[in-house]
Amino acid sequence: MKIAVLPGDGIGTEIVAEAVKVLKALDLPFEMESALVGGAAYEAHGHPLPESTLNLAKAADAILFGAVGDWKYDKLDRPLRPEQAILGLRKHLGLFANFRPAICYEQLVGASSLKPELIAGLDILIIRELTGDIYFGQPRGRRVATDGHFPGAEEAFDTMRYSKPEIERIAHVAFQAARKRNKKVTSVDKANVLETFQFWKDVVTEVHAQYPDVELQHMYVDNAAMQLVKAPKAFDVVVTGNMFGDILSDEASMLTGSIGMLPSASLNSKNQGLYEPSHGSAPDIAGKGVANPLATILSAAMMLRFSLNQEAAAQRIEAAVQKVLVQGLRTPDIYSEGTTKVGTAQMGDAVVKALG
Ligand code: NAI
Ligand code: MG
């Protein structure tokens, strides 16, 4: 089982170190190899996704990824910015299906900014399409406007687009995931305004005909944003495009107590996957040893489940995370009165110990 380890920038290196610690403690025959990515790779090789890093990722059974980015790279040309590394990996490996399970652990109900009764027992799955939409659509760029409200003015533009096969395959992923859960899918769109998302809605409806046992609901994205904080438990599987999924999953992270609790899996059609926390490199807390490593550790559990066929080991990690929360250990982002504040490494050590 070959794992490519790509820590990246900021807290990426701190949290990935803890996940690696946990993986090593499982005593399974992993081959782990690390490489630079993002700003760290730019500093060393002049490119955020060097050929050598991409090749390591392509050859691996799974990729454990931290986070990339830092404000200090904001002035670089876009192709050289750290964030291009994660977009490049998603594109080159065809990682179109992004799973973001938002689960509220019983012990963290009090850490959320929402009323306990709204989130107690929450377990929803956001499935975000990851290789299409306005994040990848061409053409894009800057130019002088020839029409619109201000002809002659400088303007910028991006293109939102989805092909039928792109929507079909993510819809199948969502309906199949729903079959293993509560058989309910909410497809989030903006069909009332955007042609791309009227098409999305039409294609999802068409695919749904093959899953008569699953309930399908359509919802506009603005309403979905509201419903997610009003009655989050009314959702089960949510499927949506790249941009809406990006925003809604950050919103959903707060239902779990902290973005530091939200893992993710990004899969291609061969079940090869990239596993990363849903958050970024958090430059504001980087280097301080306070980042929450649990989202990354839980991402490693998803890696064992989806790409490495090690369900028992995945459950061992998830049980260990639950155990440290029961023990009352908390990084600052999930701290509440009466619990014990710990740092990144202490949290990782506690999970290792809890593996038993
Ligand atoms: P962010 O997710 O890095 O941070 C948002 C807020 O959440 C910050 O206050 C941060 O301290 C906190 N936070 C994030 N992870 C945490 C953790 N594990 N424990 C405790 N607190 C945590 O998003 P932001 O600040 O918008 O972006 C920072 C950089 O990360 C940017 O360069 C951005 O482009 C990049 N980024 C990279 C991603 C990736 O590598 N997949 C995803 C999102 C952002
Ligand atoms: Mg995001």
Image: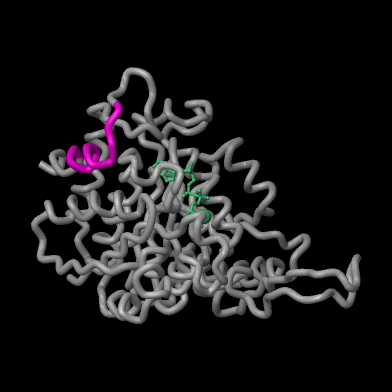
Quadrant of the rendering where the C terminus is positioned? top left
Q: Is residue 184 visible?
A: yes
Question: Which residue appears at 68% of the width and 47% of the height?
Answer: 223
Which residue of the protein is positioned furthest toward the top in this rendering? 338
Residue 38, image x, y percentages: 41, 65
Residue 337, image x, y percentages: 37, 19
Quadrant of the rendering where the N terminus is positioned? bottom left
Give above or below for 50 relative to 12: below
- According to the image, what is the colour scheme of the structure? one colour
Question: Which residue appears at 28% of the width and 54% of the height?
Answer: 16
In the image, taking residue 71 as reference, residue 41 lies left or right, namely left
Q: Which residues are magenta?
A: 341-350
Question: Which residue appears at 51% of the width and 72% of the height?
Answer: 131
- Whether the magenta-drawn stretch holds residue 241 is answered as no
- Whether the magenta-drawn stretch holds residue 349 is answered as yes
Residue 101, image x, y percentages: 42, 50
User: Residue 177 appears in which quarter of the rendering?
Assistant: bottom left
In the image, taking residue 324 as reference, residue 145 lies left or right, namely right
Q: Is residue 180 visible?
A: no
In the image, taking residue 142 as reference, residue 2 lies left or right, namely left
Give the prevailing secondary structure in the magenta stretch: helix
Give above or below for 111 relative to 318: above
User: Residue 141 appears in which quarter of the rendering?
Assistant: bottom right
Residue 195, image x, y percentages: 74, 70
Give above or below for 343 relative to 313: above
Question: Which residue appears at 24% of the width and 60% of the height?
Answer: 304
Taking depth in this image into account, of 313 and 254 the one nearest to the observer is 254
